[in-house]
Image: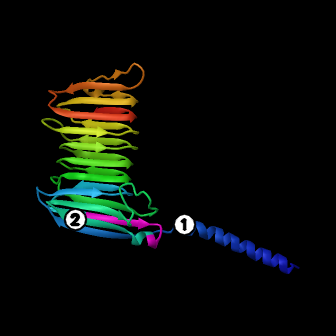
Amino acid sequence: MKSQLQINSYRAYKALIVLTVLIPALALATVSKEQNWAFSVDENTKFSIDNVNGDIKISAADGDQLLVTAKLKADNEKDMESLRVDVKESDGEIIFKTIHGESGGWFNWGNSNSGEVEFTVTLPAYVPLKSIGTVNGDVEITGIKVSTQVSTVNGDLELNGVTGNTTLDNVNGDISVEFLSFSGSQEASIQTVNGTVVVYLPADASTKVNAETVNGSIRASDFDLKASEGSFVGSSLDGKIGSGSATLSLTTVNGSIKVKGT
């Protein structure tokens, strides 16, 4: 027959097991909500996003509507209450900005807010992306036919089926860009610090190519271009595809660079 001490010890043991299982479950619990916006736009409209934590996905669509979905997520209700998306229209530009409480900012210094916002956007291909930025998150853009400016600190950038002038800045992450056309007065500046750069160009591309890396290789054999190896470190390439009318500048510190045909 079990003593009262044994019974109490068994009950305490069972309670400890339940508590051990419950704590991870509570730690994983999150709160979330979704917000949606719709705008009528034209050729004079510009679009920007200033995000802190979260991915951004933008794709071209027919019509004259700009549709934005923001999925807000946080670890608890308190963080969710201080997380919001501000929207402003000024001089033909529609600007979305994520706010993380009173101390929120570009790097969110001094703020332990767990909030994250994931943006999904569809808009006409003719609307310029004036400034698309996030600190922690990936950015994916498809089908935009005009100028595009994108930045992130920790995340990958992927652009598919784009044209127009393009400026891409990254710190920790890879960059991949597929251009539908690249000629004329078109310009692209693509740089990261820790990551690879891959650019896909059509067979009829016409551009000057300048590429530099400190720790990594450069390959552009699809267009019969060959890089020069540095005496100690680094590689560089100065070449021309077709008549060389456009300008393509590619830079990374730790990573390889590839220019490939589509």
Q: Which SS class for mark 2?
A: strand
Residue found farthest to the right: 1
Q: Amino acid at mark 2?
A: Lys
Q: Pinpoint residue 161: horizontal percent, then vertical percent.
A: 23, 45
Residue closer to the observer: 251 or 64: 251
Extent of the magenta region: 68-78
- Badge number at residue 146: none
Q: Is residue 216 left or right of residue 8?
A: left
Q: Along the horizontal axis of the image, is 144 left or right of 256?
A: left
Kindly identify which residue carries mark 1. Answer: 27
Judging depth in this view, the residue of 162 and 214 nearest the camera is: 214
Q: Does 74 lie within the magenta span?
A: yes
Q: Nearer the viewer, mark 2 or mark 1?
A: 2
Q: Of residues 149 and 176, which is closer to you in this image?
A: 149
Work out whether 85 lies above or below 221.
below
Q: Which residue is mark 2?
A: 88
Using a 10 Å C-alpha cutoff, classify the residue at mark 1 as few (fewer than 14 neighbours), some (14 to 19) or many (20 or more): few
Name the dominant secondary structure of the magenta segment. strand
Residue at the image point whose x is 65% and y is 71% from the top: 19
Look at 27% across and 46% down and name the residue there.
160
Q: Quadrant of residue 124?
A: bottom left
Picture mark count: 2
State the residue at coordinates (14%, 60%).
92
Query: Secondary structure under badge 1?
Result: helix
N-terminal of the pair, mark 2 or mark 1, is 1
Q: Position of residue 26 (x, y in %)?
A: 55, 70
Check residue 111 for magenta coloring: no
Q: Is residue 46 above or below residue 74?
A: above
Q: Quadrant of the N terminus?
A: bottom right
